[in-house]
Amino acid sequence: MTALDTPLLVLDELTVQRGEIPLCEAVTLQLSTGSICHLIGANGTGKTTLLMQLAGLLPVLTGEVSYQGVASLPMQPLYVSHQLGIHPNLTVAQNLTFLLNLYGITPSAEDIDAALTWVGLQGFETISSSHLSAGQTRRITLARLYLLTPDVTQLWLLDEPFTALDVDMVARMEEKLCDFAHAGGAILMTSHQTVGVANQVLDLTEYMV
Ligand SMILES: Nc1ncnc2c1ncn2[C@@H]1O[C@H](COP(=O)(O)OP(=O)(O)OP(=O)(O)O)[C@@H](O)[C@H]1O
């Protein structure tokens, strides 16, 4: 039995819905440990809406979601929104600490140093986050991935994580996605760029109302 044989998240006939308006119907998906699923579709199809539904930020009104074999939403998926949620009045280290605290992790100074080094922000710990470029700001939100293993959260929902990143950082991110999937995690992610490491695709265009 390979890692891909183990079902983790199952969507059965789910309606992607924003308020009263259904966007996509009867969406079906099975994600297993080891899955890196690229969620695709034109602008406005409902990709962000689906990720928000799975993160518990918007309701699932029609269809079933089961997680680890139980009819429910995942208890604590990691949801990285394309809206960054970085507080401009906090330093880089303070923002990263806050993002990790949400998952019950209190990082040590060494953890912060290692995560920021991984995203190329070594030495930025005490810099105000308002002084960073768009790509550097996104790197703060991604630095948390360095410290999150499948033991903490087995499902990553990533909304356009590669936006504003340079080629080297995208390559580093893809390596991290593979490491996480091989360690027993599963990933559902949007990107308007090619995701070379994806081993599954969900095209929402096929389900549009
Ligand atoms: N805050 C909102 N309130 C009401 N409707 C919204 C809101 N955000 C998006 N929508 C609507 O929901 C639809 C789906 O939006 P969503 O952001 O899920 O699309 P998407 O596939 O992620 O698009 P993109 O590729 O542009 O990021 C859009 O057509 C839009 O009209």
Image (spheres, grey):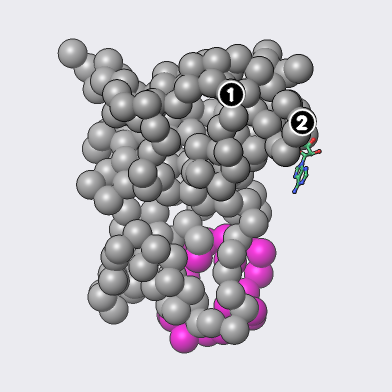
Q: Are marks 2 and 1 in contact (CB under 8 Å)?
A: no
Amino acid type indicated by mark 1: Thr
Q: Earlier in the sequence, mark 2 or mark 1?
A: 2
Q: Position of residue 69 (x, y in %)?
A: 29, 24
Q: Position of residue 97 (x, y in %)?
A: 39, 73
Q: Secondary structure at mark 1?
A: loop
Is 29 left, or right, of 203 in this rendering?
Answer: left
Q: CA distance from mark 2 to mark 1?
A: 12 Å
Q: Is residue 146 above or below residue 105?
A: above
Is 16 left, or right, of 43 in this rendering?
Answer: left
Is the C-beta of the residue carrying label 2 under 8 Å from the nearest atom of ligand 1? yes
Q: Is residue 22 magenta?
A: no
Q: Secondary structure at mark 2?
A: strand
Q: Which residues are magenta?
A: 117-140
Residue found at x 37% / y 47%: 76
Q: Which of these two is toward me, 160 or 208?
A: 208
Residue 21, numbered label:
2
Q: Position of residue 127 (x, y in %)?
A: 52, 84
Residue on which disc 1 sits: 62
Q: Quadrant of ligand 1?
A: top right
Is 76 left, or right, of 182 in this rendering?
Answer: right
Quadrant housing residue 194: top right
Amino acid type indicated by mark 2: Ile
Residue found at x 48% / y 22%: 64
